[in-house]
Image (cartoon, grey):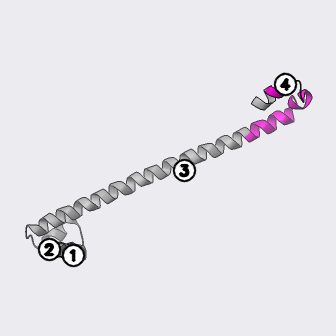
Amino acid sequence: MKAKKECMKKGLLIEYLNRKEFVDMAMEIYTVEQEKQDLREETMKEGIEKGIEKGIEKGIEKGIEKVATNLLKSKLPIEQIVQYTGLSKEEVMEIHKRLIQ
């Protein structure tokens, strides 16, 4: 609409710029561009939310591994570590293997 105001101020294309077709076309372009911007913002927001969720999940996993490591260090039986942490026996064994290396 800035371009329309500039042209009208200079007396250019007045008849064309005042036509309903031009106004409708300009509004359609503005609406499409606004929808694109809204979509970009929504997509970015969703990406940030997914990133936060993944970060939280990763932090929880690391915390559980730390607990399992501490339980292994305190010589708790692997079966009990599996029960307390929810990790599989294979996962606990892998942590144990890393611990003794």
What's the residue at 80%, 36% (across, down)?
Answer: 24
Provide the residue designation for mark 1: 89
Q: Is residue 5 above or below residue 69?
A: above
- Mark in the foreground, 3 or 4: 4
In percent of the image, x 90 and y 32: which residue is there? 16
Q: CA distance from mark 1 to mark 3?
A: 39 Å
In this picture, is 72 found above or below 24? Answer: below
Q: Which residue is mark 4?
A: 8
Q: Nearer the viewer, residue 54 or 87?
A: 54
Amino acid type at circle 2 is: Ile
Marks 2/1 in contact by CB < 8 Å: the verdict is yes
Q: Is residue 46 visible?
A: yes
In the rendered view, does 4 fall on the left or right side of 81?
right
SS for callout 1: helix
Q: Which residue is mark 2?
A: 78
Q: Position of residue 61 (x, y in %)?
A: 28, 62
The residues colored magenta run 6-29
Residue 44 placement (x, y as % from top left): 52, 49
What is the quadrant of the N terminus in the image?
top right
Disc 4 versus disc 2: nearer the observer: 4
Tell me if residue 88 is in the magenta stretch.
no
Task: Determine the image quadrant of residue 59.
Answer: bottom left
Q: CA distance from mark 4 to mark 2?
A: 82 Å
Q: Are marks 4 and 2 in contact (CB under 8 Å)?
A: no
For the residue carrying disc 1, how many other residues have a C-alpha within 10 Å: few (<14), some (14-19), or many (20+)?
Answer: some
